[in-house]
């Protein structure tokens, strides 16, 4: 049983470009959350998707958007990239969107903005 | 939203018991406390979750006093492979608030 998978592993973009990151949740999980983790810091919650809708959102600008597909996989899109968007982007899936249940994290996508 | 405070770093030795305390003064009645472990260049991994008193699983114990303003993660008999960053989280209103975590270094 595959856990949470993310693609790509690494990505290099330049300022102003757009990027799409992908996540496949653990089998049986229907809730996907996205996090941004800057070097040396804890993950920061971006948003959560459940039933193909954004249910919760952290303190991130509208440049960050997402989507969830009927098979529960998800995408994170970031427009007009800034240098400060360089980070590890983590996807987590769970059975319970109230966070009562364990979240399973993927290995992350390392985004570098030049 | 409840915020957490943890020591920035801790050192210990193989075979010792390690206790990491987290402060969460404004925790709400329905909030749970969760701990995660993260190795470099990997996603965090769930360790344990609790609401009150004591919870124990195969890898750790979690102690939560009656006022719930703090919690302590206890790792019995640590090994070198327990060197990682440990995060204490409180789930508030469907969100998990992450602090900077505690960098735990285990020495031989």
Image: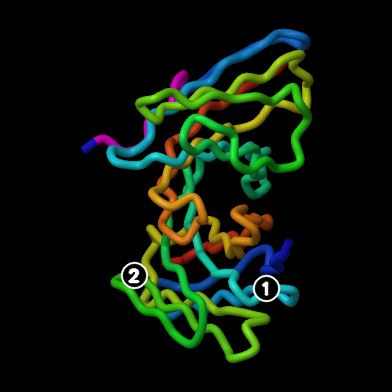
Residue found at x 78% / y 21%: A83
Asked if marks 2 and 1 fall on the same chain, the answer is yes
With respect to residue A93, does B69 lie above or below? below
Q: Looking at the picture, how far across and down is residue A40, in whole percent? A: 67, 45
Left or right relative to A63: residue B103: left
Residue at 43% x, 37% y: name it.
A106
Q: Which residue is mark 2?
A: B59
- Disc on res. B73: none
Rendered residue at 68%/69% (across/down): B7
Residue at image point 43% right, 52% down: A96
Residues marked 2 and 1 touching at CB (< 8 Å): no
> Left or right: where does residue B44 sit relative to residue A65?
left
Identify the residue at the far left of this view.
A1
User: Disc 2 and disc 1: Cα gap in Å?
Assistant: 27 Å
The answer to whether B57 appears left or right of B20 in the picture is: left
In magenta stretch: residue A8: yes
Number of the label disc, if any, that sits on residue B28: 1
When the figure is inspected, residue A73 is found, relative to residue B70, above or below; the finding is above
Q: Residue furthest bottom?
A: B66
């Amino acid at each position: 049983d595959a856990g949470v998978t993310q693609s790509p592993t690494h990505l290099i973009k330049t300022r102003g470009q757009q990027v799409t990151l992908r996540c496949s949740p653990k089998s049986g999980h229907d809730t996907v959350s996205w996090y941004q983790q800057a070097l040396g810091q804890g993950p920061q919650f971006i948003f959560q998707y459940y039933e193909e809708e954004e249910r919760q959102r952290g303190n991130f600008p509208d440049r960050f958007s997402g989507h969830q597909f009927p098979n529960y996989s998800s995408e994170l899109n970031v427009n007009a990239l800034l240098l400060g968007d360089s980070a590890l982007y983590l996807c987590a899936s769970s059975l319970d969107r109230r966070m009562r249940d364990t979240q399973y994290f993927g290995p992350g996508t390392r985004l570098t903005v030049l | 939203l409840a915020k957490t405070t943890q020591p920035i770093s801790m050192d210990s030795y193989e075979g010792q018991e390690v206790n990491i305390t987290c402060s969460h003064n404004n925790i709400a009645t329905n909030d749970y406390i969760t701990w995660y472990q993260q190795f470099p260049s990997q996603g965090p991994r769930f360790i344990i979750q609790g609401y009150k008193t004591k919870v124990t699983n195969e890898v750790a114990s979690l102690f939560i006093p009656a006022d719930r303003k703090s919690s302590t993660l206890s790792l019995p008999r640590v090994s070198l492979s327990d060197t990682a960053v440990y995060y204490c989280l409180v789930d508030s209103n469907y969100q998990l608030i992450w602090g900077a975590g505690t960098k735990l270094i285990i020495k031989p």
